[in-house]
Image (cartoon, helix red, strand yellow):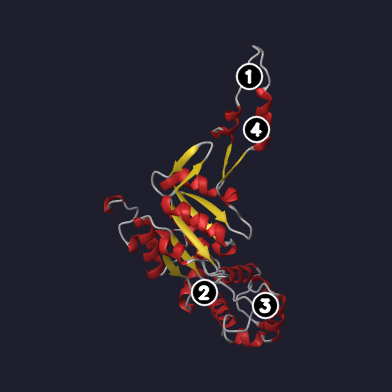
Amino acid sequence: MTREDLPFASVEELTRALRGEAYLADRALATAIYLAISLDKPLLLEGEAGVGKTEVAKALAKTLGRRLIRLQCYEGIDASQALYEWDYSRQLIAVRTLQVGEAGTPAASVGDLFGEEFLVERPLLAALRAGAGAVLLVDELDRADDEFEAFLLEVLSEFAVTVPEVGRIAAERPPAVIITSNRTRELHDALKRRCLYHWIDHPTLERELEIIGVRAPEVPAALARQVAQAVQHLRTMDVAKRPGVAEAIDWAHALAFLGVSFLDDGAASATLGTVLKDHDDLEMVRAEIARVVGAAE
């Protein structure tokens, strides 16, 4: 890809475009995204849950005007579930055409049962066929096992696969690829070497306040600051799951919807379920709600 063909002329232009889709990327993240799409390299994003890794792919697809294709990884996922499968119900119907036709000759052959019309695309095959018209999101790769990770590496190395009954299918130009991991297990070095890498951390207070302002503009500025300060304090507590940016936005939305203009002990305690999703965390924080609200004043 020549510089003239690049979708964005600079990191700054990409940053502005992402902001237009309500995603605020700092300089380091915007640079990683810019290099990934300019150099046709997958981008591996790691960080705790809720810091906005998945949102990068969503915002990028909108910014580029491309189709977002999401492969959600989970324990036990295999190549067929990610790549393709055959439409067995349609094949079964087609088998009946193998019966002798009116002219006394077979109407179809066995080979016809494995044509393109019976091939069901899964995310990886769909992304290869869409090529530069897609953003492929491989979400939470750390949930999959080593074998699937190795298979994904093979696909990303060539941006091509071979379907025995159809032949080789390759992307004319590769899609943009965003891979996310919550780091519940370590990904292999071979995959990391294939990708550009960026760690997304929880934002600073001022950055989080800015994000809430963009994603929840109906929230009064004073309340948004209190929410951001309270969430920052919650992350310093011994909770099982530290709240992410998404939870901060949800909390601000909920409080504003209830007509709350100032965060107090009662409002905070009643709405904690929007920001904490663990029973023990809720009980612990409610017992110290005055400290949490105090940190937001």
Nearer the camera: disc 4 or disc 2: 4
| Rendered image quadrant of residue 261 | bottom right
Q: Check contact, mark 1 vs mark 4: CB within 8 A.
A: no
Going by the numbered disc 4, the residue's amino acid type is Gln
Of the residues under marks 4 and 2, which one precedes in the sequence?
Answer: 4
How far is the residue under mark 4 from the one under mark 3? 58 Å
Callout 4: 10 Å neighbours few (<14), some, many (20+)? some
Real-space Cα separation, disc 1 to disc 3, in angstroms:
74 Å
C-beta proximity under 8 Å, tags 4 and 3: no
Instruction: Left or right? Give the position of 136 relative to 110.
Output: left
Label ID, residue 267: 3
> Residue beneath label 4, please?
91
Compared to residue 54, the image places residue 135 above or below, namely: above
Q: Nearer the viewer, residue 209 or 51?
A: 51
| Amino acid found under the numbered disc labelled 2 | Ala
Asked if disc 4 and disc 2 are in contact, CB closer than 8 Å, the reply is: no
Location of residue 141 by image quarter: bottom right
> Which quadrant holds the C terminus?
bottom right
User: Which x, y percent locates residue 269?
Assistant: 69, 79
Q: Amino acid at mark 1?
A: Pro
Which badge, 3 or 2, comes first in the chain's sequence?
Answer: 2
User: Separation of disc 4 and disc 2 at Cα?
Assistant: 59 Å
Write the residue at 31% across / 60% down: 10
Number of residues whose C-alpha sits closer than 10 Å to that of mark 1, classed few (under 14), some (14–19) or many (20 or more): few
Q: For the residues marked 3 and 2, what is the alpha-carbon distance in whole angstroms?
A: 17 Å
| 121 shown above or below 215 | above
Q: Is residue 201 left or right of residue 38?
A: right
Looking at the rendered structure, the secondary structure element under dot 1 is loop
Q: Nearer the viewer, mark 1 or mark 3?
A: 1
